[in-house]
Image: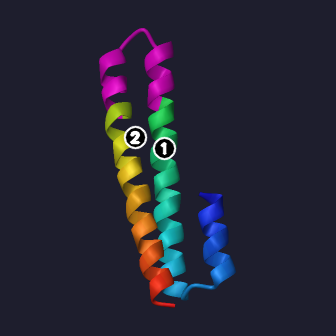
Amino acid sequence: MAAVIGIIKLLELSHQHGTIIDDILAFDSALFLASRLFSYLSVRTPRDIARLEHAADLQFPLGMAVIVASGFLLLYALGSV
């Protein structure tokens, strides 16, 4: 994700597009972090294993969808430069 932010800064996208994509990627990083945390806790915690696994299983594909959406936004922003 740092590479995408570097590309945004290097290409000097319009401030609006760059800021939106940066914010989306920051949110996406938080989703992936939460997914990893829930996955780790499901392995280490003897209680609520199914609930933690379910939370991790929901957040990971959501994070993947968000990163794909930010990729499309980046392509749109590059096309409008």
Q: Position of residue 23 (x, y in %)?
A: 50, 67
Closer to us: 47 or 40: 40
Is residue 2 depicted above or below 40 in this figure?
Answer: below
Dot 1 or dot 2: first in sequence order is 1
Q: Residues within 10 Å of mark 1 (few under 14, many from 20)?
A: some
Closer to us: 17 or 23: 17
Is residue 59 depicted above or below 7 in this figure?
Answer: above
Q: Residue at x 51, y 14 (%)?
A: 44
State the image quarter where residue 60 is shown. top left
Question: Hey, which residue is sitting farthest top in the picture?
Answer: 46
Q: Residue at x 45, y 65 (%)?
A: 71
Amino acid identity at mark 1: Phe
Amino acid identity at mark 2: Phe
Magenta region: which residues? 38-55
Q: Secondary structure at mark 1?
A: helix
User: Along the horizontal axis of the image, is 62 left or right of 12?
Assistant: left
Q: Position of residue 62 (x, y in %)?
A: 34, 47
Q: Position of residue 66 (x, y in %)?
A: 39, 57
Q: Secondary structure at mark 2?
A: helix
Whether the magenta-drawn stretch holds residue 54 is answered as yes
Determine contact: label 1, label 2, CB under 8 Å: yes
Q: Residue at x 36, y 25 (%)?
A: 52
User: Along the horizontal axis of the image, is 79 left or right of 58?
Assistant: right
The residue that disc 2 covers is: 60
The residue that disc 1 covers is: 32
User: Along the horizontal axis of the image, is 15 left or right of 31?
Assistant: right
Q: Position of residue 1 (x, y in %)?
A: 59, 57
